[in-house]
Amino acid sequence: MTNSRTTRALQAAAGMIVLAAGWQILSMVSPHYLFPPVPEIISRTIEILITGSLLIDVLLTAGRIFGGLFGAFILGAILAMILGQSKTAENFIAPVLTFFQGIPALSWVVFAIIWFHGIEFRVLFIMVMTTLPAFTFQILDAFRSMSKDLFEMTMAFRPSRWALFRFLIVPTITPGILTAWKVNLGNAARVVVVAELVGATGGVGYQLLRQQQLFDMAGAMAWTLQLVLFVLVVQQTIAAIENWALRYRAVSERAM
Amino acid sequence: MPESAIRFTDVTKIFRRPDGHGDFVAVDRLSFEIARGEIVAVLGKTGCGKSTMFNIVAGLVEPSSGEAKVIGHDPFRDFDFFRGKIGIVFQNDRLMPWRSALDNVLLGLQILETDPKRAEDIARSWLKRLGLAGHENDYPHALSGGMRQRVSIARAFAVDPEILLCDEPFSSLDEMTAQDLRAEFVRLVRQNNKTAVFITHQINEAMEIGDRVLVFHRPARIAYEAKLGTAVTEDARRTVNENILRVLAVEDPRQVS
């Protein structure tokens, strides 16, 4: 069977169509305030996208996700480089990060509300604290997987620290960085909603809270879809970057 | 006698065993000299410490005792002095998979901050000399083993090093390809007047390439040394071959008279 891009897209679309059809059947046999019809959800979704005042909430959430992820990525990359070069630093910092990993996102939300006043700083803090350990450990793993052979070969040319970083370390850790972004993006999308739900006055989470108060299921679905669409678009963008950055990899013609 | 390019004086290298129990002597009071422009083949059984000696010359490993000098400098301590002065061809090609053939050859030149235009001209000309014109943009996975090793030879020569170190560079190739590359390698070394240390475990290869052959015993110590060259007769070469075989066959090199 030819596993072409078109076939895969059709298979993915078929799954979504089955899900939508199932929902539509449920809406026919249940009250609409519990299971609104699919066309209504789609119409509300499009309405958000074309109404400037509503779209701002989506963009606000997207900005918070990017801000949090970018902050965690920069901090995580710096920490990973420090941990990768110093066993003492690893012994000192790694247990703290593991401890942070065990703290639920909701706890960070509560801590942020108690500690900080500014809404944006609260959200940024929550996003960074929940995604920092994963970024650090994933980049550290990528750094550790650096080939000893390639390291020795590069060192034979006596590179400066910058040249070593540029020519060997960056290309080595790039696949790990891209994986870290893909994994953390999903987590960040979930965490930002919780953060906005509790402590924000705008964004998708805030809008979801409003739909709950209005008992508007179509609205809740439409706002949820905004976030899902956002994650899908960004995932696809990362996948495109990944395909370009890792184009050197050999691909077997035989699929597994 | 020309000035030494490489001089080892009683060099010993001791490694800690990976399980932490005891030490392992890889190089044992090794002494030798290699003159500028000389091609020396180092021969020995697997695990005799040839590669450790190689890594000491390359400045990647520090001797436990003794003195190693390359162009009059300590290769480990004066690490930066050797920028662009040593070219290495490893046992496996060690090409960066994310770089094309051209970019792999460019690596050393980029590290040496050579003008990009000039660097590209140099890299292209070396690929051409090694029969890889037209493959400049191929990634390593698209090249055969022989072609990949040619790229790594081009990478070593491109920085115009004073000393070339080769660690069994053709051992993973088929005999025909290896023979071609050996001949090409010797021609390039002589043409460019380089000093070369060529590690191998094949007697024929050592005698084909070296002006001189050093035979190591385990741990690395010179068990036998023979000067070769175009003036040496066939009989003399046969004798050298037999002596090498005898040395490699005995457990203790001091038993060879």
Image (cartoon, grey):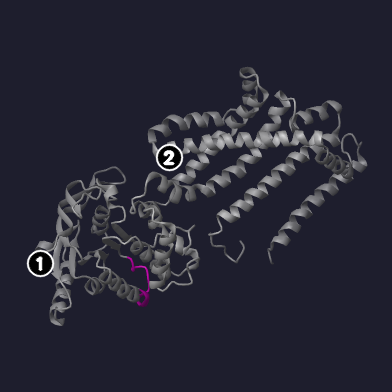
User: Within 10 angstroms of label 2, few (less than 14), some, or many (20 or more) residues?
Assistant: some
Nearer the observer, A80 or B230: B230
**Number of numbered tags placed on the structure image:** 2
| In the image, residue B175 lies in the stretch drawn in magenta | yes
Residue B177: quadrant of the picture: bottom left
Q: Which residues are magenta?
A: B169-177
**Distance from label 1 to label 2 (Cα)?**
50 Å
User: Within 10 angstroms of label 1, few (less than 14), some, or many (20 or more) residues?
Assistant: few
- Chain ID of residue with mark 1: B
Residue A104 seen anywhere in this rendered image of the structure: no
Residue A184 seen anywhere in this rendered image of the structure: yes
Amino acid type shown at disc 2? Gly
The residue shown at (81%, 51%) is: A18
The residue that mark 2 highlights is: A84
The residue shown at (16%, 56%) is: B7
- Residue B75's spot in the image, x, y percent? 24, 50
The residue shown at (56%, 35%) is: A72
- Residue B14's spot in the image, x, y percent? 22, 48
- Chain ID of residue with mark 2: A
Q: Looking at the magenta stretch, what is its main secondary structure?
A: loop
The residue that mark 1 highlights is: B256
Q: Secondary structure at mark 2?
A: helix
Nearer the observer, A233 or A18: A233
Amino acid type shown at disc 1? Val
| In the image, residue A217 lies in the stretch drawn in magenta | no
Q: Secondary structure at mark 1?
A: loop
Q: Are marks 1 and 2 on the same chain?
A: no
